[in-house]
Image: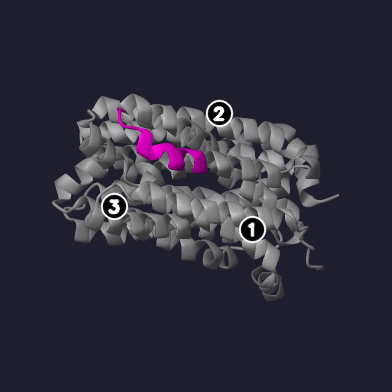
Amino acid sequence: MTQGDRIDHAAGGSLAAARWSLLFGNFVIGCGVMSVAGTLNDLAGDLQVSVPLAGQLVAIGAVVMCFGAPVLAGAVSGWDRRRLLSLALLWYGAGHLLCTLMPSFGALWPLRALTMLAAAVFTPQAAAAVRVMAPPEQRGRAITFIFLGWSLASVLGMPMAAWLGESFGWRSAFGLVGGLSLLAGLWVHRVLPSGVKPQALSRRAWRDALTHPVLMAMVGVTALQSAAQFTLFAYFAPYYRSQFNASAGEIGLLFGWFGFFGLAGNIVLSRTIDRLGASRAVLTALCLVAASLLLWPLATTLAGVAVVLVPWALGCFATNSGQQARLGQAAPALAPALMALNTSAMYFGQAAGSSSGGWMLAHGGYAPLSWVGLAFMLAAIAVSVWVGRRTPVTPGH
């Protein structure tokens, strides 16, 4: 019987509570990651920088999380996950609260980078922890369940951040994230069982993960699809304002609309992934996002944008949830390393997408963004199909 089986059979109620606390933790992490995009209009105006420069806060945080996730995964491998995850959330909360005091962009970006180290730890280590705790036949659902927190962040957190940013300023949105982070840290510490420690991986295990062509191609799908989305997603708020003269309420409603269907897509994925298979679920989600990017230039009104956003939202968060489950199933012995690498790839894609989107915005406006995003997404689909036709051989340990 595995450690996860022992925890589950001995304390099913505490396992359920722990899963909810980790879902809320991912909700808070998602709110913080997306708060820059939601408050970009006010952030640029208040700090007196251009929208493309302010948008680089997305890239800065993403780069930190990209390299931090695998590096920190090795550094904290021996930690009890109750202590690790609660401390990560407390760090995240303190960092966001301190960010509200920064007077300039030059003072803000280093503190933002340090704050995002917590996100690099929490998301992959929460997935690794819940995988240990869940029975083998429920691991796919358990992982996608806690990733519903990201979808909820898009439903509630991002629209709220956008509304707060447009109405009261970006500092109020960051302050809200800070307070919620402290609450989430206390919740995780209260309900997560002690002694949850995924097996530490040897250097050989990391080498096996990094040199396995199919597994690394699978991780590459995450990087490509994330770059595809953030080429345009990072600039939603200024796009709505500049192209349609959208009000604070309309921008918030569009983010809420996107988040509602994002949550719906992730719920459907969570309920069907163990039956349909992760590869098929991921491919479906990728194609939905590609359809929206293809149709984006046809959306010439806010109502048209709302319609075109629906497929994108359905596939947006479902894609990464499916990818985490896909990797965990493909090589269970390497799951902690692969989940860290997958999180790193997600943030690398965010950095690449937001940076390239910012450059194009500065030099050519908004028109090219959806087409570049579509090119990234078609590449992700091609790699995903290639991966789906090959069954990874789990390295033996």
Which residue is found at the position 68% from the left and 68% from the top?
213
Describe the element under mark 2 as helix, strand or loop. Answer: helix
**Element on which disc 1 rests:** helix
Alpha carbon of mark 1 to alpha carbon of mark 2: how far? Answer: 24 Å
The one of 258 and 290 positioned closer to us in this rendering = 290
The disc, 1 or 2, on the residue closer to the chain's N-terminal end is 1
Q: How many marks?
A: 3
- Secondary structure, magenta segment, majority class: helix
| Marks 3, 1: nearer the viewer | 1
Instruction: Tell me if I can see residue 280 in this picture.
Output: yes
The residue identified by callout 1 is 218
* In magenta stretch: residue 298: yes
Magenta residues span 290-301
Based on the displayed image, in which of its 4 quarters is residue 135 positioned? Answer: top right
Q: Residue at x 39, y 28 (%)?
A: 306
Q: Which residue is mark 3?
A: 55
**Does residue 222 appear left or right of residue 244 in this picture?**
right
Q: Residue at x 43, y 54 (%)?
A: 350
In x, y percent, where is residue 282?
63, 45
Which residue: 63% across, 45% down?
A: 283
Residue kind at label 3, given as amino acid type:
Gly
**Labels 3 and 1: the sequence-earlier one:** 3
The residue carrying mark 2 is: 264
Residue that extends furthest to the front in the rendered view of this protein: 298
